[in-house]
Image (cartoon, rainbow, N blue to C red):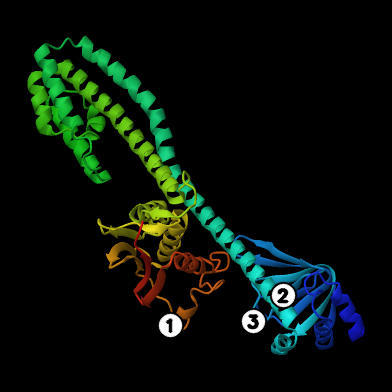
Amino acid sequence: MTTQEIADRLASHRTIGGAPREELEWLAAHGAVLRYQAGDVVSRPSEIVGGLIIVMSGRMSIYVDRGTGRRKVMEWQEGDVTGVLPYSRTLHPPGDTVVEEPAEVLSIEREELPALIRNCQHVTATLVHVMLDRARSFTSTDLRDEKTISLGKLAAGLAHELNNPASAAVRDAKLLAEALTKAEDASLQLGAAGLSAEQLATLEFVRRSWVSDSDAPALSGLALADREETIAGWLSSKGARANVAAELAQTPVTVESLETLARSVEGKSLDAALRWIADGYGARALVVDIERAASRIHALVAAVKGFTHMDRAPDQGPVDVPRGLADTVALLEGKARAKRVTIALSVDPALPTIRGISVEINQVWMNLVDNAIDAAVDRGHVDVAAHVDGSWVVVSVVDDGPGIPAEIKDRIFDPFFTTKAIGEGTGLGLDIVRRIVRWHSGAIDVDSRPGRTEFRVRFPTGG
């Protein structure tokens, strides 16, 4: 194909066809026509992009794997331009560029781009606009992918966190039906004992003293066995049946309170009284456990609602940093426990609000705390703190992990750079964190050494 024939085809090109004829002829003279078959890989992330590609026919797409599987993020066909564009600093593509349909392209080597800028001003201006549109498209895709991945992590962690209290509530609800039946039977036996008003008053006094101490710390298995043995011995000494010892051991009952009851109630009446108290306490303990489980579920749902601000439009406004940090820590507690990492949160009570989009600010906290948990050593610590420094709100996230090697410290905010294993990290988290922070007129920096890595985020105060 001659230079004139190539220039003729470029004249009908959707993107650059409006350029002066001499510029199209320059492109034709300095480019090479390449033909690809379906399935050919034009470029890979491990290779440096060769140059500018002007698609004259066919179709090609770029596929990227950001931890959620390989998928198409952009497509080019006849009339489009891809590859390295003027003033672009791109070296490696983010994924594989694969030919979908037999394609014919005009390829201009990277080394020719400075001359292209000098000799083809109209084409250069057009391609700069293409580059900006492409950057916006990739940025939008990056943000969407990272949010999707974060949402997936959040959903998985939340499902695990909700499962524990939900399972406990279901289990205790089933046990409660049986416990209520036993408590009702015990009440009938107590009624049949015919206790006097004075005896009933003593019984109620003792029962209330146990119930008021229902929040006593749980005992170890060994301590519980010792307690049951002690109570069984006391019951035997009073001629009472020892089959209630196991249930009484679960209550806060003391030998002193048992003595108080035994001075007023004796024989079979004492057996009925002890059974009534033990079964009633067992039912009440199940109710308390169900309430705690339901409260935990409510707290988790509230944390998700606060973290995502589901009931608010994503507009700029005053951002409650302490609430966002607390919600983030609550949502990541399950992951921290699984790794045996302790999270400590310390917030200045006089911390002012900042101005921004809450859901994006919370994305910053989520990424930084999540990364800190990953970096922390087994049984390690993550410290999250927030304070005021002049006209800035400063939030620090510190872990006790091995630190960031000096040779890669300057690259950790680069898109697609990650130290995690394939499938575990996208290399987008810190890049997006930096974008969000800068968009909110803030700043982020990191200080790292073995045993201590600290990320500091600064946002201007205001609300």
Secondary structure under tag 2 reads helix
User: Where is mark 1, residue-wise?
Assistant: 406
Mark with earlier residue (3, 1): 3
| Viewer-proximal residue among 70 and 230 | 70
Q: Is residue 22 above or below residue 136?
A: below
The kind of residue tagged 1 is Ala
Q: Which residue is mark 3?
A: 87
Q: Quadrant of residue 383?
A: bottom left
Q: Which residue is mark 2?
A: 126
Give the label, 2 or 3, closer to the camera: 2
Look at label 3 and name its amino acid. Tyr
Figure quadrant of residue 47: bottom right
Left or right placement of residue 405 versus residue 61 in this view: left
Q: Percent from the top left, x then y, of residue 164?
A: 42, 43
Is disc 1 surrounded by few (<14), some (14 to 19) or many (20+) residues within 10 Å? few
Residue drawn 28% across the image and 68% down it? 389
For the residue pair 328 and 360, the one nearer the viewer reads as 360
**Toward the viewer: 291 or 37?**
37
Name above or below for residue 318 compared with residue 162.
below
Q: Residue at x 43, y 67 (%)?
A: 441
Horizontal relation, residue 290 to residue 90: left or right: left
Residue 266 in view (yes/no): no
At mark 1, the secondary structure is loop
Look at the picture and state if 231 lies above or below 320.
above
Upstream in the sequence, badge 2 or badge 3? 3
Coordinates of residue 212 in the picture (x, y in percent): 18, 32
Q: Residue 280 sits in which quadrant?
A: top left
In the rendered image, the quadrant that contains the C terminus is bottom left
Q: Residues within 10 Å of mark 2 (few under 14, many from 20)?
A: some
Image-based side of 345 in relation to 370, left or right: left
Residue 442 on image: x %, y %? 41, 68
Distance from disc 2 to disc 3, alpha carbons, whole Å, reads: 12 Å
